[in-house]
Image (cartoon, rainbow, N blue to C red):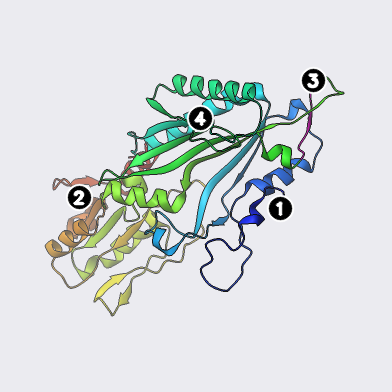
Amino acid sequence: MFEVIGEHHHEGEGEVDESHYGLKPMNCPGHCVMFSKHDRSFRDLPVRFADFSPLHRNESSGALSGLTRVRKFHQDDGHIFCEPSQIKSEIESCLALIETSYCVFGLNEYRLSLSTRPEGYVGTLDVWNKAEENLKMALDNSGKEWHINEGDGAFYGPKIDILVKDNNGKEHQTATIQLDFQLPKNFDLKYTGSEKTVENTPVLIHRAVFGSLERFMAILLDHYQGNWPFWLNPKQAVIIPVAERHHDYASKIYSKLSGKNDFITSNEASGSKSFPVSVQPGKLHSRYFNVDILASDETVGARTRRAISEGYSYIIMVGDREVENANLSVRSKTNRKTEALEIKDVITKFSNLEDNYE
């Protein structure tokens, strides 16, 4: 399969050691094979495939850098097989998905670039001109600023790249939308056009909204600097029982918020107490959150300061008053003012934060 796209010629380049492996570097050849397994009509197009399986690139050791450049990574890889007349609408849909996704993650200040026809391109000049014009119109309709990288496209088609800056001002490529006129020809992909006697070759669009998920996670880590929004935070809330007599009530609250077992186990290494992570069966519509409990011999003030330094979004206090009134004292990490809330109100509050990506 990889001989069809010419990748086997690169075998041995950048070899790190004497071991030989057969690791998948890309998903597109497999998706081309999947497309070819059925007779296709113009009525079936566009055909879209997606794949999150691990990919591998034999990067030199000097090029490796944290999560931003690794040898094994995952990517939200998608391939769209379409007619030439569908290119513009498909590109617009991809750009709209990128805009929505990046806004949700708080990465609004990304940059768009269009890489155009290079020397040594394959295909006809007319096809390239039409493709570039479609990409330009889609970029204009996106409402975002963009610029052209003249002659920087791949030999098989023009592409759109999305670039995001980290806190040091360095740009990282994340999303990409790449037109490909060559790969469908290499795999002899065909679909029946509106004139049933004519077989046409589809256009292939490679698209990834986040690109390398490892790189995207690195960008998010850098962007938020530990100050995660509630919906993304692995430490959404922590329960602090004031004294040991409040542990039973705290464990019941923990169970309702996290869906985990409602008893406390000792952590001898740290002197603190935490819950096991086994999850009890729950209703499909139940909402559960990333909640911990901080029940050590430290003072309430010391535990509160630790919860803030560890990045918990909300701190839930449980003492005599809360047990007596069957409620909770809830405060955010940025506001010392507490609210007295019933458990159902806390669930509603947390659910709304997640639903609104806050």
x, y percentage for residue 103? 37, 34
Q: Are marks 3 and 1 in contact (CB under 8 Å)?
A: no
Which mark sits nearer the N-terminus, 2 or 1? 1
In the figure, 199 relative to 238: above or below? above
Q: Are marks 4 and 1 in contact (CB under 8 Å)?
A: no
Which residue has dot 4 on it? 116
* Local secondary structure at mark 2: loop
Which mark sits nearer the N-terminus, 4 or 2? 4
**What residue span does the magenta drawing correspond to?**
188-194
Which mark sits nearer the N-terminus, 4 or 1? 1
Which mark sits nearer the N-terminus, 3 or 1? 1
Which mark sits nearer the N-terminus, 2 or 3? 3
In the figure, 293 relative to 31: above or below? below
* Local secondary structure at mark 1: loop
* Nearest the eye: 339 or 52: 52
Q: Nearer the viewer, mark 4 or mark 2?
A: 4
